[in-house]
Amino acid sequence: MNRFVIEGGIPLQGEVKISGSKNACLPIIAATLLAPGKHIIHNIPQIRDIRTMLRILELIGSKVELLGHTLSIDTSLANNPYAPYELISTMRASFLITGAMIGRFGEAHISRPGGCAIGPRPIDEHLHGFKMLGIKIKEEHGYLHLSSNHIIEGKVYLNEQSVTATENILLATATQQAETHIINGAMEPHVMELIKFLNLMGANIKLKDDIIIVIGNSLHPIEYTISADYIETGTFIIATAITGGEVTLIDAKYEDSIAEITKLQEIGVQIEKVSNGIKVKMSSPIKSCNIKTAPYPGFPTDLQPQITSLLAIANGTSIITETMYEQRFNHILELARMGAEIEIEGRNAIITGVKELSGTKVMASDIRGGASLVIAGLAANGITEISRIYHIDRGYESLETKLSQLGAKIKRV
Ligand code: EPU
C-alpha cells in the first residue's frame, strides 16, 4: 500500500495549477446522461472519485474516453438504470446518478449507500425530495427502486441544505417540461456550476432569492470546461501558510473562497487576487482564531481538517465548531500523535497552539483528513509517514507532484 513520506520545514515557493473541481465534475458527469449524444468536458481532475463515476456511466451503457484531462462521453445508447452496491459503496456521491436516471429513464434501481468515515451521512433528504416530486420509492435487500411514469414537478422543501440532495433534484427535474421550486437548496459553487451546465444544455434554471426555480426542457450535448476546485485552492493556501511560503495558485477563483480567505487573513496570511489566480504569502506568526463550519457561503467543512493543522501551531487557543458532520474529527487523534494539543468536546475542537509539530507515522481516514496530515507533515520537525493515502487520491490530483514542484520534500513510497 502506498504511503507519503514527508520531510517537513521547507517553505513552499512558486506556482501551482489548481485542478478542476471534483464536486462540480461528479454531478456534471451524471448530467451528461440527460442529453443523449456526445459531450466533451475539459479540465477533468485525474482522481479516483471521477474514475468511479465514469465506471457507473459505462455500466449504464455510455461510451467513455478520458484522454489527459479531457473527457469524451457518448450517452446515446445508455439504457440500463441500475447502479450496484460495489460502486455505490466506494463513493457516496455515486448516489447522484439516481436523479440523472430518473430524468433520462423515469426509473432508477440503486444500492442504498453504506457508512462513511466522517459520520452518518443519511439520504433521507434525497428520498423526501423525490417523494415530493411524486416519485414512487420501494426498498428491498438494500436496493432502492424509484419510478415515475408522469411529468414530475412541484415544490421541494429541503430540511437540510444538502449539496447532493439539491443536485439530485436538479438532475431529476431538468428534462421535465414543467416548473419545480427547490426551497432551502444548497448554494455551493459546485451546485451553481451544475446549474450553469444544465442551462448550457438547454434547461432554464434561475435563482429567485434563495429559491431555485427549474423549468426543464429537452437537453442537448455540449462542450464544457470545469472550473478550478475551491477546496483544493483552500488546501494549497493553508499548505503555503503553514510553511511560511509564497505561492501563486493558477486558475484559483477568489470569489468562491471568500469565507476561508477572510478567516485565513485573520490568522495573518496575505492573500491577493491576481490576474491568473490567487497569490498567497505568509511572513508573520500564525494567530489563533475561532471557526464554525456552515453551508456556503459559510466556512466549508471540507477545509476544517486542513485549517485545524494550521491552528495547531498558532499563537494562542482556537475553537473549531464542526456543525455539519459529528465525526469529522478523526484527523485530530493523528495530529495529537504529532504533538498537537487538541481537546474534543462534542462538536468543538479546542486547539491550544504548540510551538511545533513533530513527524511520526500517521494514518489518513478520509480525503480532507488525509490532506490535513500532509499539511501538518510539511511543517513538522523530522519525517512524517502517512499511510492509507488512497483516501487522499480520491480527491486530490497528484498532490505529491504539485507539492514537490513547490519545493516540498514529499515522496510516494
Ligand atoms: N443531511 C441530512 N440528510 C440527507 C443529506 C444530508 O441530514 O439526506 C445532512 C448531513 O448530515 C450533513 C449535511 O446535511 O450535516 C450536509 O450533507 P450533504 O448531503 O450536503 O453532503 P453531501 O452532499 O453528501 C457534499 C460534498 C462533501 C461535502 C458536503 C458538505 C459532494 C460530492 N460532496 O456531500 O464533500 O463535505 O457536501 O459541504 O459534493 C469531500 O469532497 O471530501 C466531501 C466529503
Image (spheres, rainbow, N blue to C red):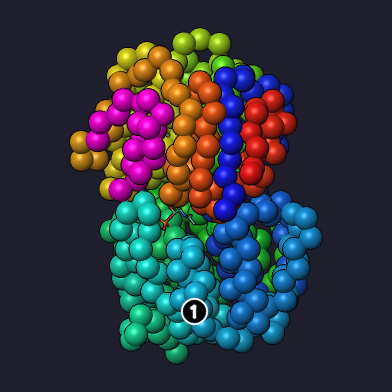
Q: Quadrant of residue 338?
A: top left
Residue 29 against residue 112 in the figure, above or below = above
Q: Callout 1, which amino acid?
A: Pro
Query: Which residue extends farthest right?
Result: 67
In the picture of the structure, the residue carrying the numbered disc 1 is 84
- Residue located 45% across and 39% down the image: 362
Crowding around mark 1 (Cα neighbors within 10 Å: few <14, some 14 to 19, many 20+) is: some
Q: Position of residue 99 (x, y in %)?
A: 48, 72
Q: Position of residue 296 (x, y in %)?
A: 42, 43
Question: Which one is nearer the viewer's eye here, 364 or 87?
Answer: 364
Whether residue 169 is visible to the viewer of this picture, yes or no, is yes
Q: Quadrant of ligand 1?
A: bottom left
In-image side of 219 versus 377 (left or right): right
Q: Position of residue 341 (x, y in %)?
A: 31, 25
Query: Which residue extends farthest bottom?
Result: 149
Looking at the rendering, the stretch of residues picked out in magenta corresponds to 327-344
Q: Position of residue 143 (x, y in %)?
A: 39, 81
Task: Please say whether residue 320 is one of the residues in the magenta stretch.
Answer: no
In-image side of 134 versus 378 (left or right): left
- Residue located 55% across and 62% down the image: 27
In-image side of 247 versus 91 (left or right): right
- Residue located 43% across and 56% down the image: 163
Query: Which residue extends farthest left?
Result: 345
Question: Which one is nearer the viewer's eye here, 177 or 350?
Answer: 350
Whether residue 214 is visible to the viewer of this picture, yes or no, is no
